[in-house]
Amino acid sequence: RLKFRFGRVLSPNPSISKMSRFDKAAAKAGAAKAAAPSPAAKAAAAAPAAKAAAKAPAVQLVTLDDKKKFILKHEMKIDDAKEAVGNEPNRAKKKELEATLKKLQQDETYVKTIQEIKDIE
């Protein structure tokens, strides 16, 4: 028993029937959405890792030469961030880049190391 609808033959078995492109795309998007974790779940999974990384010192700076190398690399990152902010036309992206720049400039290790170098010299 085949049914006709809009000039198409519909099979009694739904798995055999032809789906339109729209239906296929909707089904595919629904499957992908169900398989992808929610943004809240991603944030919850990333939070413990970020806290652990923040507690552990990232760089062990023992000698004055190590400290100066660290400062030089960090200032290069700051300069690159300034250039990116200056070259970005999109206001939303520019705000994100400015926030990143501010974090780099106020980085605890960076500020502490600069102070240590001033004290040593």
Image: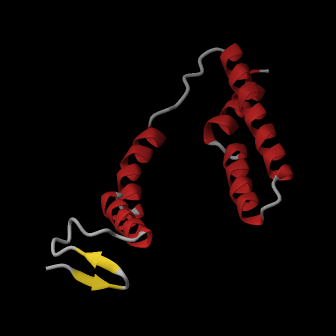
Residue situated in front as seen by the camera: 36 or 110: 36
In the rendered picture of this protein, how many numbered marks are placed on residues? 0
Visual colour scheme: secondary structure
State the image coordinates of residue 88 (x, y, percent, origin top left): 81, 54
Furthest residue to the right?
86
Query: On the rendered structure, is 84 left or right of 41?
Result: right
Furthest residue to the left?
1
Q: Is residue 50 above or below residue 3?
A: above
Q: In percent of the image, x 66 and y 49: which residue is there?
A: 103
State the image coordinates of residue 77 (x, y, percent, origin top left): 73, 35
State the image coordinates of residue 48 (x, y, percent, origin top left): 36, 48
State the image coordinates of residue 51 (x, y, percent, origin top left): 42, 47
- Look at the image and tell me in which quarter the C terminus lies: top right
Q: Is residue 72 above or below residue 48?
A: above
Query: On the rendered structure, is 42 left or right of 15?
Result: right
- Look at the image and tell me in which quarter the N terminus lies: bottom left
Q: In percent of the image, x 76 and y 44: which residue is there?
A: 81
Query: On the rendered structure, is 68 left or right of 33?
Result: right
Q: In percent of the image, x 35 and y 58: which residue is there?
A: 36
Query: On the rendered structure, is 47 left or right of 2?
Result: right
Task: Locate residue 95: give its quadrant.
Answer: bottom right
Residue situated in front as seen by the camera: 41 or 104: 41
Residue situated in front as seen by the camera: 90 or 121: 90
Q: In percent of the image, x 45 and y 35: which residue is there?
A: 56
